[in-house]
Image (tube, rainbow, N blue to C red):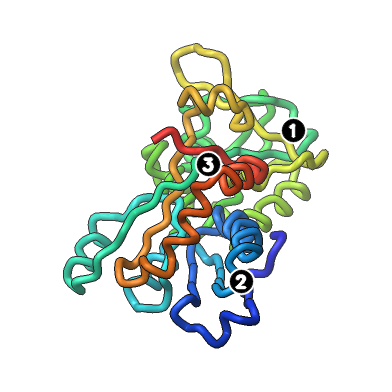
Amino acid sequence: MRYSVCFVLMMLLACSNRQKAIKMKGSDTEVNLAVVLAEHFYKVNKDHSLAISGGGSGLGIASLLNGQADIANSSRPLTAEEIKLFKQRHIELKTIVFAEDATAFIVRSDFPADSIDVPTLAAILSGSSKTWQPVTGNPVPVNIYGRQSNSGTHSFVRNKLGIQFSREAKEMNGNAQIMEGIKADGSGIGYVGAGYITHDSKVKVLKISDSSGKPAISPLDKKAINEQRYFFQRPLYQFVLSTSWNKVAPFVDFEKSAEGQKIIRASGYYITQQ
C-alpha cells in the first residue's frame, strides 16, 4: 500500500482547533484515495486536520457506532443489523456516494488466459472448482487471495456471486498484500479495487463475461463503466455522523468540486452517475 495502515495528516493550525479535527476510518479500497483528497483539501483549508486509517468497511462503521470516527469509508452499504444498531443508539447518519469502483480480478502476468465468465469465477472462489481446468484446460490447483469478512470488497464479491468463499482462501490484510501475493503465485487469483491497478507488468487484470455470451469487459474500460456494463462495479460510500456534519461538510464539498472529481478520476476511480 502506498500509505501506512494508519495515515495521519496533521496540520499546524488545526492542532489547536479540535472543532475542525476530522477522524476518518474504514475501507481499504478508499483509504489511498481519501489520503490524496485530504492532501489537496488542506492546501486551501489549513485550519482543518484529518486522521485517516483503513482496516476495512466493517471497522469504519463500528468506529462510528463507538464514537471513534466522524466518517466511515465503506465500499458497501450498511447491513440490516448495522442499521438496527444505529437506530437503537439514536445515532443519525448522512450517506454520501462520492465515487464508483470496479472490482478487478487479477492473476499473474504469465497466466494463460485473459478472461473468465461469472459462473466459472463463482465456482472457483467458492471452492467447488478447485483447479484451473475450466479456464485454461490445465488441472493446476487454484490459490485464492481474498480479504477478511470485515472487508466491504469481500462482502460485495460474495453477495454479487451469491456464494460463500472457499475455506481455503487466503485472507489478506489489504489490496496491496493481495497484489504482492499474486505477483509471486502463478496459480493465484485475487480481487482488488480498480484504483489499485497500475501498469504493473507482473499482474494481469482478467476481463469478465456474464453467461449471456456478450464480450468480456475489463474493469479498466471507462466507457463500459460509464454505461454500467461491468458486472462488478459499485458505489463507494462515506457515512457521516450527523453531529459531525458541520466540520465534515467542507471536505465533502471539496470531493464534489471539479478539483476533487479530477483527483478521483486520476486515482483510477470513477464518478458516480447517481
Label 3 SS: strand
Residue type marked 1: Phe
Q: Which residue is mark 3?
A: 101
Mark 2 or 3 closer to N-term?
Answer: 2
Q: Position of residue 231 (x, y in %)?
A: 47, 29
Q: Residue at point 25% right, 65% down?
A: 92
Residue type marked 3: Asp
Nearer to us in this view, 100 or 141: 100
Q: Residue at point 36% right, 71% down?
A: 244
Q: Which residue is mark 1?
A: 111
The answer to which quarter of the image holds residue 80 is: bottom left
Residue closest to the far top: 213
Label 3 packing within 10 angstroms: few (<14), some (14-19), many (20+)? many
Q: Residue at point 48% right, 76% down?
A: 20
Figure check: 20 above or below 55: below
Mark 1 or 3 closer to N-term?
Answer: 3
Q: Given this view, does label 2 or label 3 mark the residue nearer the observer? A: 2
Residue closest to the far right: 201
Q: Given this view, does label 2 or label 1 mark the residue nearer the observer? A: 2
Left or right, 67 with reference to 256 = left
Figure check: 42 above or below 11: above
Residue 47 visible in the picture? yes
> Number of numbered discs present?
3
Q: Which residue is mark 2?
A: 46
Cα gap from disc 2 to disc 3, whole angstroms = 29 Å
Q: Position of residue 98 (x, y in %)?
A: 46, 47
Mark 2 or 1 closer to N-term?
Answer: 2
Cα gap from disc 2 to disc 1, whole angstroms = 48 Å
Label 2 SS: loop
Residue type marked 2: Lys
Residue closest to the far bottom: 16
